[in-house]
Amino acid sequence: MNEPVSSDYIYLDWAATAPLRPEALDAMMPFLGPGRQNIPFGMNPNSLHTPGRTAFAVLEDARRHIARCIGARRPSEVVFASGATEANNAALFGMARAVACERKAQGKAAQPLSVVTSALEHDAVLHPAEQLRREGFDLVKLAPTRAGFIEPSALDAALGEIEPGGVALVSIQAANSEIGSMQHVAELARIAHAHGALFHVDATQALGKVEFLCEPLGIDAASFSAHKVGGPKGVGALYLRARTPFQPLLLGGGQESGLRSTTQNVCGIAGFAAACQAALANMEEESARQRTMRDWLYRELTKIDGVQAAVLPPEGSTDYLPNIVTVLVSGWESETLILRLDALGFGVSGGSACSSQSLDASHVLRSLGIDADLALGELRISFGSLTSEDDLRKFVRALTDCIA
């Protein structure tokens, strides 16, 4: 039988998933009621009858809200998906393959096209990139600096070594889920376009924490996930700039203007839109509060013997996410610490929750040049709007006791 979670349990794993926002739940409730009351909302939005048209109106209203939240030029540039993993897969496969087909149709030389990404990326980008390599694309992975950044000059140099017109796609994340470093997206996009490449951003961790507006950034595609901003799981979106070359990953009924076939999850999408709006409503104030907490936590944790920062943002730095603190605990494996802290009432992680069952050192930390044994002691603390300063003080005492 599952163990109940104590009411005084302190959840510090917001980068893995954020608790469902009340605004999202309220938006979803009309779809969840029993009997006849939910019929208009619970119908297929692609049906022509009145209940279907009602569901369609909710779907398109949510699309408009999300388009405004992410800075899309028009709502049709928002393509709904099951989450950021699907959106990332769709972007990499859809854009790279489309460019290859265009090149073939134009009768251009048959040398392999290149896909460029970074060693910092989530597996939802790295694994599709590896699959594209197996399909015949050349794959280039850029190494980050020790502080966790992809230098624009490094991207420019890498693209400059490839024959003009030979790069199909560049995919570089907006913010890292383990160390919090935020890339200079606008400059990277400009360089990619100057070399004739499309540019995709995994913006999963950025949305709701920092300003991220697709059109002003000049990007071609971006991936988002609802549950990272307090929406439901199983819902996400792909921003796809109008007229961007793209081959759909899912074929079938032609929903989402033929870009992603399957009946839309209108209930989840309504929750996604409400969560986005709630997250952005007081984002600046909340990010500033969390940034202060981040800096304090880094100071206190690095006072503990054997604990060091994976990266150490300068105090007040806006180059790192405000809500992620990652430390390395010498002589410990993260799994042991996570379970001990969990028993004491604290929920933290050892890095990306998507690979938490792996016993290997984080590929993100290894790309920074951190020793594998030390990287195995990774501990990520991430927080959000419900986290208080007192929660963090209690956590510092608990970790000190664990190590002692």
Image (cartoon, helix red, strand yellow):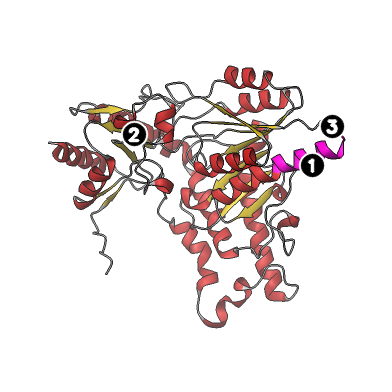
- What stretch of residues is rendered in magenta? 95-108
Label 1: how many Cα within 10 Å (few below 14, some 14–19, many 20+): some
Say what amino acid the circle numbered 3 marks. Lys
Q: Is residue 402 visible?
A: yes
Task: Please give the count of numbered marks on the rendered protein.
Answer: 3
| SS at mark 2 in the image | strand
Pointer 3: what residue?
108
Residue 45 at what x, y percent from top left? 68, 67
Say what amino acid the circle numbered 2 marks. Thr
Q: Residue at left 74%, top 22%?
A: 163
Q: Earlier in the sequence, mark 2 or mark 1?
A: 1
**Is residue 174 shown left or right of residue 336?**
right
Say what amino acid the circle numbered 1 marks. Cys
Q: Residue at left 32%, top 28%?
A: 295
Reply yes or no: does residue 106 show up in magenta: yes
**Up/down of 110 relative to 394, above or below:** above
**Is residue 278 shown left or right of residue 92?**
left
Q: Which label number is shown at residue 101?
A: 1
Q: Main secondary structure of the magenta part?
A: helix
Pointer 2: what residue?
326
Task: Say which quarter of the image contains residue 58.
Answer: bottom right
Task: Say which quarter of the image contains residue 192.
Answer: top right
* Quadrant in which the N terminus appears: bottom left
Q: CA distance from mark 3 to mark 1?
A: 10 Å
